[in-house]
Amino acid sequence: MAEHFDLAIVGGGPAGQAAAIALQGLDLSIAVIDEQAQPGGQILRQPPAQFAVRLWLPGRAYDRLKAQTEHFGRLDRVSWLGRHTVIEIARDGAHFALLTENALGVRAITADRVLIAAGCQDLAVPLAGWTLPGVYTAGAIQAFVKSQQYVPGERIVLAGTHPLQLLIAAQIVAAGGTVAEVLFAQPISAMFRAVLTKPLVGLRGSGNMLAAAAALRILRRAGVPVSFGSALQRIEGESRVTHVILASGRRIACDTVGLNYGFVPQSLLPRMMGAKVRPAGAAGGFAAVHDEWMRSSLPGLYVAGETTGVAGAPASQAEGELAGVGIGLDAGWIDMAEAGRQTRRARSRHRHLQAFARLLDTVANPLPWFPVPEDDTIICRCEDVDYATLAAQSGGGSANAVKLITRCGMGPCQGRNCEPSLLRMLDDRGLTSDPGFTQRFPARPIPVSELADPG
Amino acid sequence: MSKTDVLIIGGGLIGCATALHLARAGASVRLVEAGDINAGASGQNAGSLHFQMERRFLENGAALADQAARIIALNRLAIDEWRGLEVDLGVDLHVSQKGGLMVAETPEQVALLEAKSRREISGGLATQLLDGDAARALCPALGPDVLAASYLADEGHADPRALTPAFAHAAAEAGAVISTRQHVLSITRRSPGGFDVAAKKGDEMETLQADQIFVAAGAWTPAVCALANLHIPLFPVALLMNATERTGPILPQLIQHVGRRLSMKQAYAGNVIIGGGWPSRLAQRPDGGFDLNARASIIPLSRSGNLRAAIDIVPQIGALNLIRSWTGVTTISADQLPIAGAVSRVPGFYVAAGGSAFTLGPTFARLIARVMGGERVEALDVLSPDRFNHLNSFMG
Ligand SMILES: Cc1cc2nc3c(=O)[nH]c(=O)nc-3n(C[C@H](O)[C@H](O)[C@H](O)COP(=O)(O)OP(=O)(O)OC[C@H]3O[C@@H](n4cnc5c(N)ncnc54)[C@H](O)[C@@H]3O)c2cc1C
Ligand SMILES: Cc1cc2nc3c(=O)[nH]c(=O)nc-3n(C[C@H](O)[C@H](O)[C@H](O)COP(=O)(O)OP(=O)(O)OC[C@H]3O[C@@H](n4cnc5c(N)ncnc54)[C@H](O)[C@@H]3O)c2cc1C
C-alpha cells in the first residue's frame, strides 16, 4: 500500500520549504521529497553533517535562507524524504501517485495535491573541447566548493555571460582555490546599458548588485583578472584541459574550466505530466506556467520556484509561500481573506524580484555570445551525436523528429543537456516554438527489477 | 493547386513505402503528412519482425486462428521483402534476421506452441519446436523457466527510426512530392471521377486534385475516411514500450512469449527493448471520445507486468537500468486483420491500416501499389476493406 499524504512537495529548496512553512499549524500531512540528503536546495547545498567546514557560505544574502532551513527543520507533520528521487508523478483517480527511488528501492506515495519545486540546472553549452576532463558547469564547481569545501582543479577559468560567475569565483578564492581568469563574453557596455534602461529595478535588486560588487573586490584583492568582451572559442588539452583559446586568439593556461551561460528550469516532471510550459527565456529551457496561486494547468498540481523560471532564491521563497497559501486556499484550510492577508508581502516582494530577474536576464543574455560548436563537437553526450549530424537534420522537423533520426536526446538524461542546443539550431532555421523532446517515464534511470511486479 | 495521379494521406511507413512503389511505377504522387514523417506508430513501435503467428490470434479461439493462417502467406512474402530491403533502399536499417524464439513456461503453453507450429508448417513456415535446453543453447540468456520454444530463423528486428525516413527519401528521389505539417481537412468526390482534397499548412489552404486517393493514416484512418463519408472499422489502441540502458550483446534473437504478453530484443545500439502488447490508456477528449493527438498514459500495472515477464524469461534484464517507457498508438480492425485495398463503393479510393504493419507494411505497400495500378493481387483478398462493405451500404 502506498503511503498517503495531504500534500507532496518535490524539492526541499527555498521554494519547497517556504510552501511547507506557509502551511504550518494546519492539521496536514506533508511529504517533502528531495534527492539531496538534507534540506536547502541548490543554494544551500549543505555539507554532510560530519564534515567540518570553516567557511560555510559567507554573505548576508544567505542568512535568511539559512534561517528558513532551520525553521523548516522544526516543522512537525512534515516528513522529510531525503535522498529520494521522484521518478514519476501521475494522476490516479482522485489523487496523485508518485514513485520515488532511494537506495532501498522504489517507494510509492499518494497525495491529494502535489507541488513541484524542483529548481533549475546549469545550461550545458557545447563547444570544442567541452567533453574533456576538467570541464564543468560553474555551478558544479560551486557545488563541490559549497558542500565539501573541495576545489576541483589547480587553475580555474570561469567563462560565460552570467554575473553569478563572479560570486562563484569569489567562493573558489575564499575556499583557497586559484582562479586564472573570469571571462565574460559580452562587453561591459552591454551589461551597463541593460541596467541603465531600468535604473529603478536595478536599485531594488541592489542586494544582488552589492554581492556582485563585493565579489569583484575579493577577486581584485586576490589578483584575479575579470575581462569582458572575451568570448571563449575552444577548450584544448590531451587527456585533460591544458588551456582555453578565446575568439581573439588569446590563450589562457588552466586545468579546469567552469562554464556559466545561465540556468534553465527543471521542467521534466511537469512536462512528463502534461502541464503547460512556456519557453523560459534567452538561456533556453521550459518553465511551468501558473496562475497567481501557483496553480499549474493541471488541477491539484502546483509549481513554484525555479521550475517556473529562474529568478533567484528569494523569488523562489516568495513563490513557495504563494503556493503554500494557494494550496491551503484550494483545500479550504485557509479562507480567501486570510490568504490575501498572508501573502500581501510575498506578492509585492515577488513582483520586484521578478522585475530584477528580467533585468538580470538581459544583462546575462547568452544568445549573441554562445560559442559556435565545430562539426565534430559532441552535442548529445549520452548518445554521442555531433554538431554536423544535427546540422544535417535540423531542417527536417521537430525536435522529436530529429531525435528519432539522430538519437539526440534518446539517452538516459532525456535531453536535459542537449535539448537547448538543438532547439537553438531549429530556431536558427525558422522552426521556432518547438515544444522540445517529449518527456517520459522515468525521470531518472532505475533498475528494471525495482519496477517489475514482485511476482 | 496541385494535380497528381495519386494523393497519399499519411506519412508513416505504409504511406511512404507506397509512395515509393507508385512513383517508381511512373505515377505522379503527392503525399501529405499532418505532422512529421514517421511521427506516428511507425516511429514508436518495437521494431519486431515477427512471422510466427501472434499470440492474440491463438488466444481468441479457432476462428481467429484460421484467419491468421491466411496471413501466413503474407508473412512469407514479407520475409523475402525484408531480406532485400536494405539493398533496395541503399540504407542501413539495422535489419537483424538472426531468428526468433517464442517461448513457453507451462505445459499448456507448450501444447499451444505445438498447435501453432503445426498450423505454421502446413502454411509453409519453417517453424521448429525446441525444448528448453535447446532454446537456451541458442540463446543462453533465457532463464530456467523456459520449458520450450518455437524457433523461426527468419525472424528478428530492424530500426523503426530508420525505415520510414528511408522510404520517404527514396520516394522523393523517385519523384514523389512530400509535404509535412499539412493536414487534410476535407475530401470531395468529383464527377465523373477523382477527388478534390483541401489541406492546410500553417495558415494556408491548398487544394489537391487527384485521380486516386490512398489513405494510410494509421490510427487516424477512420477519421480521414469519414471525410469521404465512409466507415472503416478500425479502433485505436495504445501500447506500452520500455527500453533499458545499453548493454553488451546478450540477446541475438527476437524473444516472444506464447502465453504472456512479451516481446524483447536488443537493438543495434545495445538497448533492450521490451514490449508485447501491454495496454496504455488513450487520452480522452473533454467532450468525449479518444484524443489521438494527445499522449496516451502509462498504466502502472502494465509496466510492472511487462517488466516481470521480461525478467522471468531473461533474468539478467532485472539488473539493467530502465531509461525510458513510452506509449504509442496504433490501430486494430473489427476482425483483427489489417485492412488493405480498394473501397469498391468509392472508385479510386484505397486504404491500408491496422495490424503489425512494421513487419508487414513494406509488403502491403508493394502490393497496394500494384492494385492501384490496376492489377488484381490475390494475396490481398483476405485484407480487402470490402469485407466490411455492409457498414458502408448507406454511406459513400
Ligand atoms: C548549480 C547551481 C548553482 C547555483 N548557485 C547559486 C548561487 O550561488 N547564488 C544564487 O543566488 N543562486 C544560485 N543558483 C540558483 C538557485 O538554485 C536558486 O536561486 C534557488 O536555490 C532556487 O530555489 P528553488 O527552491 O526554486 O530550487 P532548488 O534550490 O534548486 O531546490 C530544488 C530541489 O529539488 C530537488 N529535486 C529536483 N528534482 C527532483 C526529483 N525528481 N526528485 C527529488 N528531488 C528533486 C533538488 O535536489 C533540489 O534540492 C544556483 C543554481 C544552480 C543550478
Ligand atoms: C508501441 C507499438 C509497438 C508496435 N510494435 C510493432 C512491432 O514490433 N512489429 C510490427 O510489425 N508492428 C508493430 N506495431 C504496429 C506498427 O507500428 C504499425 O502498424 C505501423 O507503424 C503503421 O504504420 P502506418 O503508416 O499505417 O501508420 P502511422 O505510422 O501511424 O502513420 C500515419 C500517419 O498519418 C498521419 N495523418 C493522420 N491524419 C492525417 C491527416 N488528416 N492528414 C495528413 N496526415 C495525417 C499521421 O500524422 C501519421 O504520421 C507497433 C505499434 C505500436 C504503437
Image (cartoon, coloured by chain):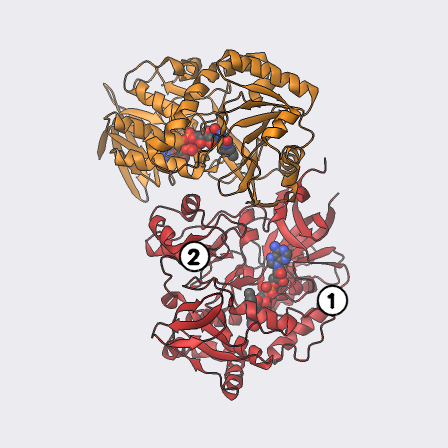
Tally of numbered tags: 2
Picture layout, residue B396 above or below residue A318: above
| Residue displayed at 51% across by 79% down | A179
| Residue displayed at 51% across by 34% down | B46
Ligand 1 contact, mark 2 (Cβ < 8 Å) = no
User: Is B47 left or right of B371, judged from the image as shown?
Assistant: right
Alpha-carbon span between mark 2 and mark 1: 43 Å
Of all chains, the one bearing label 1 is A
Crowding near the residue tagged with mark 1, few <14, some 14–19, many ≥20 C-alpha atoms within 10 Å:
some
Q: How far across and how far down the image is residue A204, in percent? A: 51, 78
Q: What residue type is labelled 2?
A: Ile
The furthest residue to the bottom: A221
Residue B104 seen in render:
no
Q: If the image is split into quadrants, where does the C terminus of chain A sit?
A: top right
Picture layout, residue A275 above or below residue B218: below
**Hue of chain A?**
red
Q: How far across and how far down the image is residue A339, in percent? A: 64, 62
* Nearer the observer, A137 or B140: B140
Residue wearing tag 1: A73
Q: Which amino acid does label 1 sit on?
A: Gly
Question: Within the displayed image, which quadrant is ligand 2 positioned in?
Answer: top left
Residue wearing tag 2: A378
Q: Which of marks 2 and 1 is nearer the N terminus?
A: 1
Picture layout, residue A229 above or below residue A268: below
Picture layout, residue A286 above or below residue A106: below
**Hue of chain B?**
orange
Ligand 1 contact, mark 1 (Cβ < 8 Å) = no
Q: How far across and how far down the image is residue B30, in percent? A: 28, 32
Residue B209 seen in render:
yes
Q: Closer to us: mark 2 or mark 1? A: 2
Look at the numbered disc 1 and give the secondary structure of its residue.
helix
